[in-house]
């Protein structure tokens, strides 16, 4: 009975904290919109971010994410009994790496930093996590584990950044990943985890941000938000998915991969499609363009708001599949792995189709415009 009372008290506490964090985030965003009009708006031709929308808007949303992240950490010691989490080296690694991601993102929004500098800081973020004990452990070799961790952290940071190309998309995808992580923690009864309070705080800031970022948006999160979210989500992915702390001593590798991929499926799909399409077209995958999965859906006729709803629906499906895995699937088998691999492959094939089809439509439209210009008499 005492345990049930404590859990009920914790639920009320988390709910109040979430409501306060949403309200505080809304207030910060309103103030930032009033006083910061140009952060992240670049006028120089070589520094303009390629976005789907034609209008430039301030990239200030990410500042709120980081403020709420820090306030959540500070609030933990006030709301709960001191936990060993606060004294672990991994906690310091998350704090430092998220701070580094935030700073390089803010610098990029303000000054348009060099790509090599951003990549260097991403390496630093991964190195900070590895050096403080947060690394993927799926191989016997530490070298392989550290290498995979580097690719994971840098990959997720860039994937989240690349998805920030249309109103509401990155926030929606990040919300989906965080809700999956919160479900995983609550499902295993870890209700006093410091990470849980921080995840709820960041979730609240993202929901408040969507009020201003859903189409038609008033602000963007900018690199300030995407770089912070990238390293934060990558770290949570390592702790709660790749290294599943609630799994038995010998977890099923297929289940581990399925749950992780389902949680991060949208950034993984978008980055895979974009990189493959650009390389196959002889273009650098690091130069931006309007060839993302989000753009392809818009080119096929969906409005910006409907594209956001599609991504929100896919995020919900991922959560539902993870719930099914945890609640209804017993011993993991190769059949289960095959089913989830088929689902991932079907989505990958769908987005490859939409991006190729959208690209063909774009080229056809450009040819039509060019022909009309050539056939228009001079002076008309």
Image (tube, helix red, strand yellow):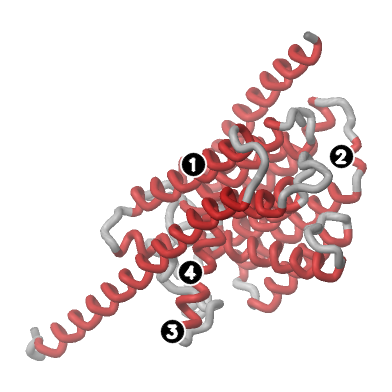
Report if the CB atoms under discs 3 and 2 are less than 8 Å apart: no
Report if the CB atoms under discs 4 and 1 are less than 8 Å apart: no
250 up-or-down from 355: above or below: above
Q: Residue at x 57, y 50 (%)?
A: 335
249 up-or-down from 121: above or below: above
| Residue topped by disc 2 | 85
Q: Nearer the viewer, residue 70 or 91?
A: 91
Distance from disc 3 to disc 4, alpha carbons, whole Å, reads 12 Å
Q: Quadrant of residue 114?
A: bottom right
From where the camera sits, is residue 31 visible? no
Label 3: few (<14), some (14–19) or many (≥20) C-alpha neighbours in 10 Å: few
Among numbered discs 1 and 3, the one appearing first in the sequence? 3
Q: Element type at marker 4?
A: helix
Report if the CB atoms under discs 4 and 2 are less than 8 Å apart: no
Q: Pinpoint residue 272: horizontal percent, then vertical percent.
A: 53, 68
Horizontal side of 116 relative to 269 (left or right) equals: right
Report if the CB atoms under discs 3 and 4 are less than 8 Å apart: no
Q: Nearer the viewer, residue 70 or 257?
A: 257
- Residue 281: image tag: 3
Q: Residue at x 13, y 83 (%)?
A: 372
- Residue 273: image tag: 4
| Residue topped by disc 1 | 316
Q: Nearer the viewer, residue 330 or 365?
A: 330
Distance from disc 4 to disc 1, alpha carbons, whole Å, reads 21 Å
Among numbered discs 3 and 4, the one appearing first in the sequence? 4
Label 1: few (<14), some (14–19) or many (≥20) C-alpha neighbours in 10 Å: some
Q: Quadrant of residue 267?
A: bottom right
Observer-side mark, 3 or 2, equals 3
């Amino acid at each position: 009975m005492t345990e049930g009372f404590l859990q009920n008290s914790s639920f009320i506490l988390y709910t109040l904290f979430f409501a306060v964090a949403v309200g505080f985030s809304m207030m910060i965003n309103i103030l930032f919109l009033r006083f910061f009009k140009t952060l992240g708006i670049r006028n120089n031709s070589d520094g303009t971010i390629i976005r789907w929308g034609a209008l430039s808007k301030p990239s200030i949303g990410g500042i709120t994410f980081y403020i709420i992240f820090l306030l959540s950490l500070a609030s933990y010691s006030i709301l709960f009994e001191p936990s060993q989490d606060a004294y672990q080296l991994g906690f310091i690694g998350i704090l430092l790496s998220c701070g580094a991601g935030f700073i390089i993102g803010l610098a990029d929004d303000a000054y348009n930093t060099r790509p090599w500098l951003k990549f260097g800081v991403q390496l630093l973020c991964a190195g900070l996590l590895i050096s403080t004990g947060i690394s993927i452990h799926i191989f016997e070799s530490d070298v392989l584990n550290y290498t995979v961790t580097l690719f994971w952290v840098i990959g997720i940071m860039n994937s989240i950044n690349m998805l920030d190309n249309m109103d509401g998309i990155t926030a929606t995808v990040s919300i989906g990943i965080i809700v999956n992580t919160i479900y995983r923690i609550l499902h295993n009864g870890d209700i006093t985890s410091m990470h849980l309070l921080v995840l709820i705080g960041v979730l609240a800031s993202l929901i408040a941000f969507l009020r201003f970022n859903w189409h038609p948006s008033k602000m963007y999160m900018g690199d300030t938000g995407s770089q912070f979210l990238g390293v934060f989500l990558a770290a949570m992915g390592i702790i709660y998915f790749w290294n599943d702390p609630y799994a038995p001593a010998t977890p099923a590798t297929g289940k581990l991969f399925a749950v992780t991929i389902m949680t991060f499926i949208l950034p993984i799909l978008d980055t895979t499609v974009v990189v493959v399409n650009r390389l196959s077209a002889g273009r650098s995958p690091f130069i931006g363009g309007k060839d993302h999965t989000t753009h392809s859906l818009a080119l096929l006729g969906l409005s910006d708001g409907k594209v956001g709803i599609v991504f929100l629906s896919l995020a919900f499906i991922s959560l539902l599949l993870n719930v099914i895995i945890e609640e209804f699937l017993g011993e993991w088998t190769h059949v289960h792995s095959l089913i989830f691999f088929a689902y991932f492959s079907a989505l990958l094939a769908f987005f490859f189709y939409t991006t190729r089809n959208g690209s063909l439509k774009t080229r056809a439209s450009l040819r039509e415009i060019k022909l009309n210009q050539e056939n228009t008499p001079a002076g008309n």
